[in-house]
Structures are given as structure tokens and as C-alpha cells.
Amino acid sequence: MEITSFEQFELNRQLLNAVTELGYTEPTPIQQKTIPLSLENHDVLGIAQTGTGKTAAYLLPLLMKIKYPQGTNPRALILAPTRELVMQINEAVSAIGKYTGLRHLALYGGLGPKTQIEALQKGVDLLVATPGRFLDLYRLGEIVTKDIRTMVLDEADKMMDMGFMPQIRSVLEVIPTKRQNLLFSATFGGRVERLSAEFLEAPIKVEVTPQASTADMVSQVIYEVPNFRTKVNLLDYLINKDAFQRVIIFARTKSTAENIYKFLARKVVESDRIRVIHANKGQNTRINAMEAFKEGNIQVLVATDVAARGIDVAQVSHVINFDLPLIYEDYVHRIGRTGRANHTGEAITFLTMAEEYHVQKIERIIRMTIPRKPLPTEVEVMETPFDEQQAMLREIDEQRRKEDPTFLGAFHEKKAKNLPNAKDRLKAKSKLPGSKKAASQGNNGRSGAANRKTGTPVSAVKRSGSRGGRR
Ligand code: AMP
């Protein structure tokens, strides 16, 4: 039976009213596929990225099951990797569970447990938690787990990336074995597969491919940019265009995020229209920045991947990847910030020659080639400073070695390779241009020179067939 309305799920009136109020007219594909299964009490493995409506996909049947407030112990547990995501899921529970009266609570670290303990003692029906904080409070004797009948793991791939497996195992040991399990993940690979084998019972796997959702909803484009300063110029140029009304700029590191923020706040965007969030920012600063961004009071949010996880803002006009994430799935999370349910958006990636390697990996994950555009003529192209050039060439060498461990390095291994043992090699390496100390001495970067001449950043990176895949 084709499902085109929420009425067909036979949810209770309280939930249907909330869904109507939220303006959801039609279930999204992941909702169509997983809600009936969850309602029938199956274990479900949902492969869906953020922006597909996955949160409501597990919340609706879950709230249907726990229905109304009862007793004092939680009857359902949702685990998520970060406090931002926990807060976001908890907000979704507030919205979708608005008319159910269910008592729900977000548990996360970064602040004292007192308020959370007080709320627990008043009685709750549903917990949304990071694994660490859940265990801390459990060990303090503040959570009674015996009535938990449903367990959800959200963004399971991220939890694996963040090394939460031991905590998840500990949680599983302290909750009843007779329960329904729902696991959601943006990607499905080795570790998530193992987790699901350990954690789910005869699960039914439902997949909404990122291919369809990212490609349909988000137009993606790459600009090849020779260096950091030119990236800054391009950013300056783009942000000033009218269409860039609500922009998230992603950076891999805290310091890059901070530098982008300082530059834009000084020269490009009015300082009260821009915020930055990263791990060094206090909890309150991050929450305030996200709220201000949600309300449309600021135009630009600069963020690192971890800080941005869980941001749910409709109508982000543009996502700019100032650089590429090293956890490739984060690319999918990043661009999922734009083009959310029923809005189209644009994701723009700035790419140096050292990032070419990463984009190839990402393109494999999203199963498409991201189109490239030439740099707008208005953008001033800067000379690449010597140190930056060296650093990029070193990175490219590293990448080639990763693909092919026998590769000796076009850039700085030549001298080292004839040395008798590993220790001597290391010593020699520290004297070569690869080391910080030597970074300002002479240019041995032959591959780099070739690159600069031809302007083809790819040549040094193209995979030379990763012989046997040894890594
Ligand atoms: P999620 O993938 O759970 O992060 O959801 C992405 C966004 O889609 C959120 O802002 C939801 O409120 C919204 N959403 C979820 N389900 C629907 C639906 N059926 N129709 C329209 N919007 C939805």
C-alpha cells in the first residue's frame, strides 16, 4: 500500500495534530518505510542522513508506543553522539509530543548534573542522552532502567567515529534485553554493520540513499582555489552576493574557523550578523549562536564539524565548505544543512590541490561527481606562499603513500631512501624540507613546480592504483 498521508499510519490524534501543526503534509520516504515497521515492533536499521526526516521517523512510532505519562521510570531511551544533537532531538520530542503530555529529558555533559538529576527524580517517560552522561547518571543511581522497552541509536556512524562503542556496550548491559531497537545512521559500513549485528535482533534494513536526497535537494559545486588567501577572497566575494542570506561556513579546525570569523567580522559582515562555534566556545555561547541563527538574526555561522552536528535550521541558503572534512561522511552531514525537507539549497566547496584526494573519496560516498566552476573573474588570485606550498606538497605525498605504501615520495623521500635503517631515515627526514625546521630552506618540490606550471592540482594526487589495497 502506498502511503501518502500521516493518517494512514493510524497514529493517535495527539500526534497527528502535532504533525499537522508542524506543517508536515506528507511523510518523507524514510518515514513511509520505517514507521509501519516500528509500529509492528520490528527492530529497524535505518540508513538515512540528516535532512531526510529521520528524527520524526523514529519519534512518531516511539511516542505512539509510550502514549501517555506513566510511573516515574523512563520507558524509552534515545542515544545520540553530541549534546547539540541531543538538544535538537529533545526539541523535536517537544514539538511532536506537544499534545501527549509525555515527560522527556535531555541528558548531556558539559555542565553539572544537578538540574538533570532533579528532573529525573520528578519522573520521566523518555530520555534523550549522550552515552557518557547517561552512564554517569546511571552509576550515580539516578536512572532506573528496568522499564526501558525501546532504544534508539541516532547517528550511529558518528558514534562509532567518536569511539563510543565501549559506552554503548555498557548501556546495553544495563537496560532490559527484551526491547525494541531502532538504529539510524547516515552511512552503512563496517563498524555500523558490526554494531547492528550486536545490537539489533533480526532487523529490517531500510535505506534512503544519500545519492537521491543530496543530489535532488542540494546543488553542489566546487571551486578549485590555489591557496588559503584566495579562499578568503572567494569567500569575501560570495558573501556579498544577495542570495547568500543564511550561510553556514564549515572549517576543519578551530583555528581556521576562528580566522574566517575574524576576517569576515572585521571586513565583510556586520559583526552582529556573524557568529562562530567550535569546541572551545562555551556551551552557552554555542546555544545562543545556534538560536540566533535559527531565528534569522544572523547571516553567517562559522562552524567546525563537531560543533555543528545537530544544528537543525530550515532554509539555510548556502553551505560553504571552506575546506573538506577529514571524516568524509561529514561532507554529507554538512551539505544536509541546506536543502532540508522541501527547500533547495546550494553547497559550495573550496578545493586546493591537497584536497583533491579527499574529494575523490567523498564523491565515491555520494556516488556522484561534483560539478566544478571556474573562479569568478572578480576574485583576486593570490600567490601561494612558499610554506603553504610545501605543506600542501607534503600532504599530497602522505596521501600517495597511504594509497601505495611502496611509494617513496616525489617530494622529500629521495635522500632518505638509501639510508640503512628506519631510525636513520627518520633523522634524515627531519632535515629534509618535510620538517618544520627545514620548511624555509630551498625548494625541492619538483612535483609542486610542475603543478604550479600546469595549474592541474590533480596530477600529483591521482591514485596510482592502490596495489592490493594494503594500508
Ligand atoms: P531530520 O532529517 O530528522 O533532521 O529532519 C529534517 C527536517 O525536516 C526537520 O526540520 C523536520 O522538522 C523536517 N521534517 C521532518 N519530517 C517532515 C515531513 N514529513 N514533511 C516536512 N518536513 C519534515
Image (tube, rainbow, N blue to C red):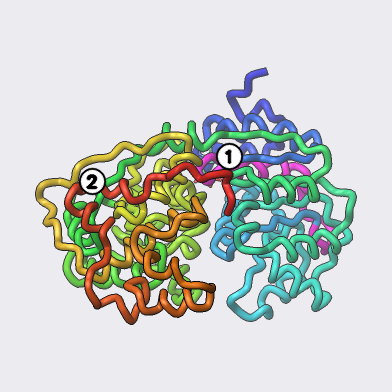
Quarter of image, res 147 = bottom right
- The residue depicted at 88 percent of the width and 60 percent of the height is 146
- The residue depicted at 68 percent of the width and 63 percent of the height is 164
- The residue depicted at 50 percent of the width and 41 percent of the height is 365
**Looking at the picture, how far across and down is residue 250, in whole percent?**
38, 58
Query: Of the residues under marks 2 and 1, which one precedes in the sequence?
Result: 1
Residue 357 vs residue 236, the one in the foreground: 357
- The residue depicted at 68 percent of the width and 18 percent of the height is 1
- Disc 2 vs disc 1: which is toward the camera? 2
Point out the stretch of residues depicted in magenta: 49-74
Mark 1 surroundings: few (<14), some (14-19) or many (≥20) residues within 10 A: many
Residue lying farthest to the top in this orientation: 1
Residue 62 included in the magenta stretch of the image? yes
Circle 1 sits in a helix, a strand or a loop, which is it? helix
Residue 445 vs residue 135, the one in the foreground: 445
- The amino acid marked with disc number 1 is Val
Residue 300 included in the magenta stretch of the image? no
**Looking at the picture, how far across and down is residue 333, in whole percent?**
48, 50
Q: CA distance from mark 2 to mark 1?
A: 31 Å
Indicate if the residue with disc 1 has its beta carbon within 8 Å of ligand 1.
Answer: yes
Callouts 2 and 1 close, C-beta under 8 Å: no
* Disc number for residue 19: 1
Would residue 423 be found to the left or right of residue 90 on screen?
left
- The amino acid marked with disc number 2 is Ala
Q: As displayed, is residue 54 above or below residue 254?
A: above
Indicate if the residue with disc 2 has its beta carbon within 8 Å of ligand 1.
Answer: no
* Disc number for residue 243: 2
Would residue 416 be found to the left or right of residue 322 on screen?
right
